[in-house]
């Protein structure tokens, strides 16, 4: 954003000093592009700083066998282990979360100490 602003100012100065009409038109086009780019970057920065757009879903449809999270979704930014109390509930309570193997366990079953 700073580089675009710097290029915008230097292009404006160059366009002001130019007496050749063809070069002046070229500088004006470049000045217009830089100004639009800077305005777009400023708008994106403002939206980023304000937290972006909030979306409210009034209707949710989940097909048979599908799952949906009901509630606020946040990222685990501290990389703390998840606990059962902090896990969101599935929309269809009859369908629980898929079991995940623990570290070091095979995905298949184990019978009498031998892998199946």
Image (tube, helix red, strand yellow):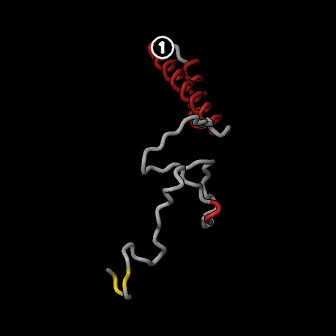
Where, quadrant-wise, is the C terminus in this rendering? Answer: bottom left
Q: Residue 88: x percent and y percent?
A: 59, 55
Give how far across and how far down residue 22 sits, in percent: 44, 14
Along the line of sight, which residue is nearer the eye, 56 or 47?
Answer: 56
Name the residue located 57 percent from the left edge and 36 percent from the top edge.
57
Question: Measuring 50% from the left and 59% from the top, which residue is drawn there?
Answer: 96
The single residue placed furthest to the top in the displayed view is 21
The residue lying at 68 percent from left, 37 percent from top is 50
In the picture, the quarter occupied by the N terminus is: top right
Q: Nearer the viewer, residue 39 or 32?
A: 39
Outermost residue on the right side: it is 50
Q: Secondary structure at mark 1?
A: loop
View extreme (left): residue = 116
Closest to the observer, 95 or 97: 95
Up-down: is 92 above or below 37?
A: below
For residue 47, what is the image quadrant? top right
Q: Is residue 75 above or below residue 54?
A: below
- Residue 94 shown left or right of residue 84 in the figure: left
Query: Which of the 4 image quadrants contains residue 9?
Result: top right
User: Residue 99 at x, y = what percent?
Assistant: 47, 66
**Given the current orientation, which residue lies at the most extreme front position?**
94
Q: Is residue 23 above or below residue 97?
A: above
> Relative to residue 16, is residue 113 drawn left or right?
left
Number of marks in the rendered image:
1
* Label 1, residues with CA under 10 Å away: few <14, some 14-19, many ≥20: few
**Left or right placement of residue 38 versus residue 25 in this view:** right
Q: Which residue is mark 1?
A: 20
């Amino acid at each position: 954003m700073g580089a675009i602003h710097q290029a915008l100012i230097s292009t404006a100065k160059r366009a002001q000093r130019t007496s050749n009409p063809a070069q002046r038109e070229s500088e004006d086009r470049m000045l217009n592009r830089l100004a639009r780019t800077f305005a777009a970057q400023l708008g994106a920065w403002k939206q980023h700083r304000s937290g972006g757009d909030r979306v409210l879903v009034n209707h949710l449809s989940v097909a048979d066998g599908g799952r949906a999270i009901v509630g606020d979704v946040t990222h685990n930014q501290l990389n703390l282990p998840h606990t059962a109390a902090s896990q969101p509930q599935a929309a269809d309570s009859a369908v629980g979360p898929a079991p995940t193997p623990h570290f070091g366990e095979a995905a298949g079953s184990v019978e009498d100490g031998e892998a199946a």
